[in-house]
Image (cartoon, rainbow, N blue to C red):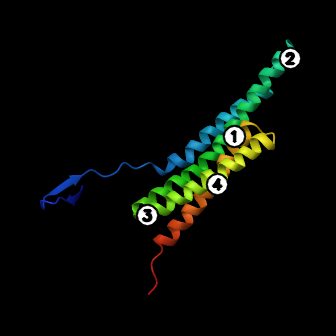
Amino acid sequence: MEGTAEPSGDTVETPPAPEVPPDFWRWRPTAVLLGAAFCCRLILDFPFEDGGSVVLLLAKGWFITAIMLLLAAVFQFSDGVQVAANGALRGLKDTTVPMAITALAYWGIGMPVGWWLAFRGGFGARGMWMGLIAGLTVAAVLLYLRFARMAAPSRP
């Protein structure tokens, strides 16, 4: 256990921070992709003989679900990088610039792109998720680059 100095000079033991296993970031998107593949399989095996329009409506619902699950899986990859880079920067006591980066990426890129794709591009909910993925990916890349620059050893 590590200790921290109190104003009185005493040392207080603090427990180590819980760690997320590295495999978590690899298996979480995989699980979502498997769920999407399962939904796609249900669409392909769906019986189309009786009830024509009802069956097509149900099949369309399964298809939308499968597409949304695929988008959620893509979202997980960018989210994992973004969370790790943000946490690493927090560990370097860098919080102001990452806050600005995430605000710009989410509200300046993600929301406008999502709005445009959803309402002007005709993608609906899928378009909004695509915009959120775009903003999150920009945040992940910029936060990673910031961390790489700050963590690099300084040259004399």
Which amino acid does the dot numbered 3 rest on? Asp
Report if residue 85 is visible in the image: no
Q: Do the residues labelled 1 and 4 touch (CB within 8 Å)?
A: no
Q: How much space separates mark 1 and mark 4, taking CA atoms?
A: 24 Å
Which amino acid does the dot numbered 4 rest on? Gly
Toward the top, the furthest residue is 50
Which amino acid does the dot numbered 1 rest on? Leu
* In the foreground, 80 or 26: 80
Instruction: Check disc 3 and report the residue beneath it.
Output: 94
Q: In this view, does 52 lie to the left or right of 68?
A: right
Marking on residue 53: 2
* Vertical arrangement, residue 79 with respect to residue 156, above or below: above
Q: Which circle, 3 or 4, is nearer the viewer?
A: 4
Q: How much space separates mark 2 and mark 4, taking CA atoms?
A: 42 Å
Q: Which of marks 2 and 4 is nearer the N terminus?
A: 2
* In the foreground, 47 or 74: 74
At x 22%, y 58%, the residue is 3
Q: Is residue 17 left or right of residue 55?
A: left
How far from the left and from the top, in percent, is residue 119?
77, 40
Q: In this view, does 75 lie to the left or right of 46?
A: left
Residue 41: which quarter of the image? top right
Q: Which circle, 2 or 4, is nearer the viewer?
A: 4
Q: Which of marks 3 and 4 is nearer the N terminus?
A: 3
Picture quarter with the N terminus: bottom left
Circle 1 residues within 10 Å: few <14, some 14–19, many ≥20: some
Picture quarter with the C terminus: bottom left
Instruction: Check disc 1 and report the residue beneath it.
Output: 70
